[in-house]
Image (cartoon, rainbow, N blue to C red):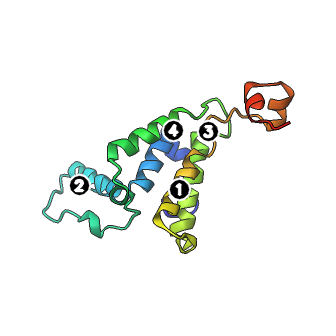
Amino acid sequence: LMKWGIDIFQVDKLTNGNPLLFVGWAILASPYSQHAMINTLRDKNQNRGDNDTDIKNMQGYHFIDKYEISQVCMVDFFRVIESNYVKDNPYHNSIHASDVLQTTHALLTGMNGKRFATSDLELFSVLVGAAIHDVGHPGTTNNFQTNIYSELALIYNDN
């Protein structure tokens, strides 16, 4: 997920329509997510050994430990966020959110974008923001919402 050009539509297929759950967990729960994947593959291949990888020495954001977030809470958060994206929206959906999150992660890690962050909390906020930036987006413009006097326009339009 650190590389540019991931086929996010393939990720959507492989995750049975839950790309944000997988991408969000894989990135924000790193290195715990990588550790779980390694152990799952090791168990699947029946190649169990005593050389279990130490999480503290693995690369990743380590947000789980830094902010004392339970892994269950992290997964539940991404389930709720993904469920609140409008599935019928052809663009501003959870596939798009997954793509933005993965691209942001690639920019931060693979292209040394982390150097611009002032803290780990800032990195965490940027990544969460990438995941949630279009939650509930109806798929229409502000102007359209204003012209039809929608509830959204009545709440958020200053005119």
Q: Is residue 111 above or below residue 71?
A: below
The disc at residue 81 is 4
- Helix, strand or loop at disc 1? helix
Residue visible at 49% across and 68% down in the picture: 119
Instruction: Provide the residue designation for mark 3.
Output: 93
Q: Nearer the viewer, residue 57 or 39?
A: 57
Number of the front mark, 2 or 4? 4
Q: Which residue extends farthest front?
A: 158
Q: Nearer the viewer, residue 67 or 99?
A: 67
How crowded pointer 1 is (Cα within 10 Å; few <14, some 14-19, many 20+) is rated as few
How crowded pointer 3 is (Cα within 10 Å; few <14, some 14-19, many 20+) is rated as many
Counting residues from the start of the chain, the first of labels 1 and 3 encountered is 3
- Helix, strand or loop at disc 4? helix
Q: Is residue 134 above or below residue 104?
A: above
Residue type at mark 3: give it. Answer: Asn
CA distance for labels 2 and 1? 33 Å
Counting residues from the start of the chain, the first of labels 4 and 1 encountered is 4
The disc at residue 42 is 2
CA distance for labels 4 and 1? 15 Å
* Residue 98 shows up from this direction: no
Instruction: Provide the residue designation for mark 1.
Output: 125
Residue type at mark 1: give it. Answer: Ser
Number of the front mark, 2 or 3? 3
- Helix, strand or loop at disc 2? helix
Question: Would residue 60 be found to the left or right of residue 111 on screen?
Answer: left
CA distance for labels 3 and 4? 11 Å
CA distance for labels 2 and 4? 31 Å
Confirm or deny contact between disc 1 and disc 3 (CB under 8 A).
no
Question: Would residue 11 be found to the left or right of residue 32 on screen?
Answer: right
Residue type at mark 4: give it. Answer: Ile
Number of the front mark, 1 or 3? 1
How crowded pointer 4 is (Cα within 10 Å; few <14, some 14-19, many 20+) is rated as some
